[in-house]
Image (tube, rainbow, N blue to C red):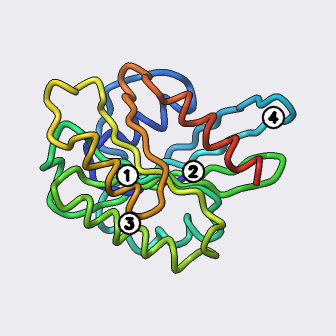
Amino acid sequence: MVLLGSSAVGKSSLALRFSKDEFRSTSPTVGCAYLTRVVHLSDVTLRFEIWDTAGQERYHSVTPLYYRGAHAALLVYDISNRVSGTNTCTLELTRLSFSRLLYGVYLCVLVSLQESFIRAQVWLKELEKQHIPGSTVVWLVGNKGDLAQDRRVSVQEGQVLATERGLSFTETSAMSGDQVVELLLAIAVQNHSR
């Protein structure tokens, strides 16, 4: 599972919630963290392997290594802040594979500036260069749903972008855990059923 995007949109927190169902305030990721999560479906057990790496721009050149052959991608933005972190789209990478059918699954986490929707399209184009069309399940995920009172990106904006680009869409909160397990299960089901 790979998380791509700017600092401070909740990538590490989302990865931690995926893997351990925990929330901790985190500092910007330095280096690499490895996390795992086992998901049980009715007929199969899948093991998610997650590599969470730093979100600085200098890591941009390694991203194709993480999304080549991906079977799922999540483009995640912070719903509460149109100017999150910096104005550039920096990266955090997490790679996920399943133990039974070894899928590379990607979470793409993007800045939540107004231009984040444009950046999402840029990341989609990058993903499309690295995979066979239709082979990757792609989600647009609005994170930090617990800050809905401070919302700067509407549900409708996210839904419109997802619909226009043929993506699945949801909003999550790494802090509260809202919709995180449901998202993880949806990714597992979509990939297992293909």
Residue type, mark 1 in image:
Val
Q: Position of residue 37 (x, y in %)?
A: 65, 33
Q: Please tell me in which quadrant of the rendered image residue 42 appears.
A: top right
Q: Position of residue 109 (x, y in %)?
A: 37, 52
Identify the residue position indicated by label 3 in the image.
59
Q: Residues within 10 Å of mark 3 (few under 14, many from 20)?
A: some
As measured in the structure, the alpha-carbon distance from the residue carrying label 1 to the one carrying label 2 is 11 Å
In the drawing, does residue 132 fall left or right of residue 53? right
Which sits earlier in the primary sequence, circle 4 or circle 1?
Answer: 4
Q: Residue at x 38, y 36 (%)?
A: 171
Q: Residues within 10 Å of mark 2 (few under 14, many from 20)?
A: many
Q: Residue at x 41, y 50 (%)?
A: 140
Which sits earlier in the primary sequence, circle 2 or circle 3?
Answer: 2
Question: Callout 2: helix, strand or loop?
Answer: loop
Question: Callout 3: helix, strand or loop?
Answer: helix
Which sits earlier in the primary sequence, circle 4 or circle 3?
Answer: 4
- Count of residue discs: 4
Question: Callout 4: helix, strand or loop?
Answer: strand
Residue type, mark 3 in image:
Tyr
Residue type, mark 2 in image:
Met
Q: Residues within 10 Å of mark 1 (few under 14, many from 20)?
A: many
Q: Which mark is residue 109?
A: 1
Q: Position of residue 80 (x, y in %)?
A: 19, 36
Which sits earlier in the primary sequence, circle 2 or circle 4?
Answer: 2
Q: Residues within 10 Å of mark 4 (few under 14, many from 20)?
A: some
Query: In front: 46, or 169?
Result: 169
